[in-house]
Each structure stands twice: as structure tokens, then as C-alpha cells.
Amino acid sequence: MTVTDRIPLDPFGSDIVAESARLRALGPVVPVELPGSIPAWAPTGYDALKDLILDPRVSKDARRHWRLWPELATHPSWGWMANWVGVVNMLSTYGADHTRLRRLVAPSFTHRRTEAMRPRVASLTAELLDALEAEGAEGRTVDLRTGLAHPLPMRMICELLGVPEELWPDAARLITDFMDTSDQSPEFAASVHERVGSVLGALIEYRRGRPGDDITTELIRVHDGGDRLSDEELLHTLLLVVGAGFETTVNLIGNAVVALLTDPAQLTAVRAGEVAWGAVVDETLRVHPSIAALPLRFAVEELTVGGVTIPAGDAIITTYAAAGLDPAHYGPDAAVFDAARAAEDHLAFGVGVHRCVGAPLARLEALTALPALFSRFPAMRLTVPADELRHLPSFIAHGWQEIPVRLGT
């Protein structure tokens, strides 16, 4: 196929598994069209994606390396993409800038600091399960997303960042809308952009006046103490930490719950200790990664991947869902959820210098919440067939809008 035959990606992410299979059938790297008719290249398999992530000739910096960067402001339907590639944080920098910004954030997610949060994760999980049990009494249906999967990581990252409680709803809504790729209207994109400044600006203002033992205060001190962090970098680094710090874990917990509730035999094996909860988490991240695809990276120079040439300056989307479902790497049953396969080499958290610094916290939260949930409610079941669950309106975020269950207590 030629670049004139670009395949449009579904902005609603309605069937990511089927879409990944269709793209893979066309080749190892396929020309695609993102919402708003933005051209890009999509690797369709594990090896192609890993090679591109690790290739130093692939950049995250749109300003320096995307040939269409000068046109971004002239396309009304590209505003959603401007919100992604126009920020300045670890997600959109290259080389020395990426290293500098990563070094500022990484100390907040060390093993020691993550382990210190374990008691708080456990106590908050118990508190949320108590509330769920009360809400679901007498057979009433409850939504596990709003009752557990969302508030646990949201409150943990807000506590880490020092977000005042009155800003929690605004911060959560901002990230939900940031991930929504179904609406390419200029008005929606402008609203998201404005709220990045107003919501996170309010957080900065609050913590500047009330410093505490939190990430926001630490970043403000770096910013105010020299030239290591600009105004824009401070704001956008907070955006990245709050978004990556909870939205991905929301979907990890929710996707694992749905996978197990739709596979009773596998759930029985997990409960019997035949399969470890850590393996459940890894298999969830492989088959149902919290981020299905992430915009954008850019070819610094002409690249050849899997026999396909990507011209210098072209955009590349990182396709984690497609990589996890690649039969060339995981076998002919790659699309089947099977925690016993222990797929620890999945790419859902990235790889190399681009591995997510918050991965240990996400695992801690999931490995606390999932065993506690299924232990407390052994008769829990979905109240609708799995194929009636509504996917998040996004080709980026991979999860469910609601997870209705009866707890069976």
C-alpha cells in the first residue's frame, strides 16, 4: 500500500483488538490517519514498536522534528493534537531535555518512596471497599470504576502532588477530557487547553503559598531556585504526572476486573494461588494495556523498519495494544487473556529510558486493590454482558466508561 492509502483510526477506540489485527495484516508499519486527518505511521507488531522506541533517531519533540509542526495552528481539527505535542514535559522532549526533566521527576517514584506508600494504598483500598459494600447492599448494582478503580489512584496521585481536595474533581475531569479523542472540535480542544492552565495553575498557586512534602512543592522549588525548569515545563510536568499517575491505573484495575469476571476458570486459578496476581497484572497490560496508542514520535532522519521506509519529519504513533497482541511474538493465541503465560516483557510501561517512572506505583495500587476486591466479594459478577460495556471514547485510553457489578454480599 502507498501513503495515499492511509487507514483512518477509530477516534472512539470501539474495537482496538480488531483494528490492531486489520492493521497488522497490512504490514509491519502502516500509514494511518489520526482524528482530524493527521498523517502518521503505525507499527503493528512487537519488534517494530520496540525498535522504534529505542531508536535514537526517533524523537518526541514536535517543535524540532515534525515537518507538520508549522501547520498545526492552521488546522482547526488539530487542536486536540496540539494539546498532546505542544506541551513541554518528558512526553514531548528529546535527548538532553528529556534526561533533565526525567531526573527532576524520577526521585519522587523511587522504590523506597513507593514502598512507603503501601500502608496508605492499603487503608484507602479498605475504605473504598467498605463504601462499595454499603452501596451494593441488598443486591444493588455498583460501578467499580467510580467506586474503586478511579478514586484509588486518583486520590493517591493527588496526595503525592499535594492537590487540595477542592481541586480533585477539576483535575479528574481535565484528564478525562484530555484523553477523549472523539471530539475534534476547536471549542473542545480550547477548553482542555484553558483548563490545563487554570486547574494546574491553581495547584501551583496553592502550593507556592502552602509548601508541603509533595511533588508540586519540590518542582516549584526547582523552578524558583534557578533555570532548570521553565514556567511551561513546570505546568506541563504536573499535567503529565497527574495524568499518567492515575488514568493508566484506573484502566489497569478496571481491565483486570473485567478480564477475570469474564473468565471464571482463570479467576478460580488465581484465587487458588495457581496463578499469581502479578501475572494477572502483566497479562492485563499485555492484552488490555491502559494506553492503547500514544501520540506522537517523529523520525529525525529517514528510517527503515520492517522493510518500510519512514521519511524524515514524519509522525509515528506508539501502538502498545497492537504490540501486545502480536502473534509473531506471543504466539497464535496472542489475543487470548492467559495470565499463566507470565508476559513480563510487555511494552505497556515503555522500555529503556522511556519506561514510565510511575510503573512501580501503578503495580502497587493494582496488586493491593485486585486481591482485596476479589477476596471481599467472591460472588461478584457483571450485570451486563461484557460486549455491552462501553469503551472510553478514545483511541489512546483503553478502558471502560462503567463496570456495573453486583457484589453478591
Image (cartoon, rainbow, N blue to C red):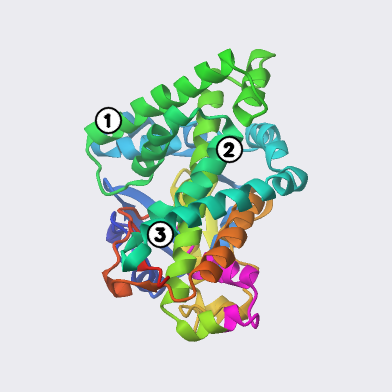
Sooner in the amino-acid sequence: mark 1 or mark 3 = 1
Q: Which residue is mark 3?
A: 144
Q: Which residue is mark 1?
A: 74
Q: Residues within 10 Å of mark 1 (few under 14, many from 20)?
A: few
Rounded to the nearest angstrom, the CA distance separating label 2 from label 1 is: 26 Å
Residue 226 location (% of width, % of height): 69, 14
Look at the numbered disc 3 and give the secondary structure of its residue.
helix
Q: Amino acid at mark 1?
A: Thr
Rounded to the nearest angstrom, the CA distance separating label 1 from label 3 is: 42 Å
Q: Residues within 10 Å of mark 2 (few under 14, many from 20)?
A: many
Look at the numbered disc 1 and give the secondary structure of its residue.
helix
Q: Which residue is mark 2?
A: 90
Residues rendered magenta in the picture: 269-293
Confirm whether residue 23 shows in the render: yes
Disc 2, disc 3: CB below 8 Å?
no
- Is 18 positioned to the left or the right of 55 in the image? left
